[in-house]
Amino acid sequence: MRYFVAELETGYVVVGDFQFFRGYTLFLCKQHKTELHQLDKYFRIKFLEEMSEVAEAVNIAFQPKKLNYKLLGNTDEHLHWHIFPRYENDPRPQGVTWCIDKSIRYAEEARPNDEDLAVLKEKLLNALKTTASNIR
């Protein structure tokens, strides 16, 4: 549970194991589904609401210029949001995070050490306490 930050009603908040984009966060659905429409209506609405609360916390904690949201599922067939903080000094291409070569995004320099990870998690958890209504 090295990257775990918080449990919400519909999912788990974790920081990414690589922080090429500082503050990169995931929100993992508690139900094992592959598509949003597979969730019952109440749970789906709550899941989307909580994803928005997590994104707001990322914005507060890391103060990026912009946030990118991704819900893909081509590799990991389980609903999970990627929330990428984007900054003025991001490398080109500015648009698509996946276009940056994996050898750069997943370089060891992008993996936070224990101290950096603790700071990331603390900042995010503190921000979540102001945005999320159902931290468990």
Image: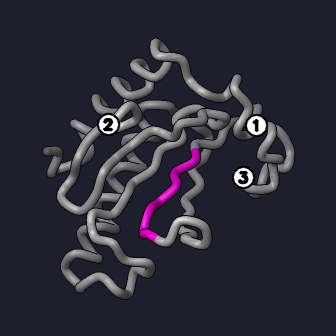
Q: Earlier in the sequence, mark 2 or mark 1?
A: 2
Counting other residues with Cα less than 10 Å from the Cα at mark 1, is it few (<14), some (14-19), or many (20 or more)?
Answer: few
First in residue order: circle 3 vs circle 2: 2
> What sort of colour scheme is used for the picture?
one colour
Element at label 1: loop
Q: Is residue 80 magenta?
A: yes
Residues in magenta, as a range: 78-84
Question: What residue type is disc 1 on?
Answer: Asp
Q: Residue furthest top?
A: 115
Write down the residue under mark 3.
97
Pair 3/2: label in front? 2
Q: CA distance from mark 2 to mark 1?
A: 25 Å
Query: Quarter holding the C terminus?
Result: top left
Q: CA distance from mark 1 to mark 3?
A: 10 Å
| On screen, residue 38 above or below 45 | below
**Crowd around label 2: few <14 · some 14–19 · many ≥20 (10 Å):** many
Q: Between marks 3 and 2, how big is the CA–CA gap? A: 23 Å
- Residue 75: percent from the left, percent from the top? 60, 67
**Which residue does the numbered mark 2 point to in the structure image?**
5
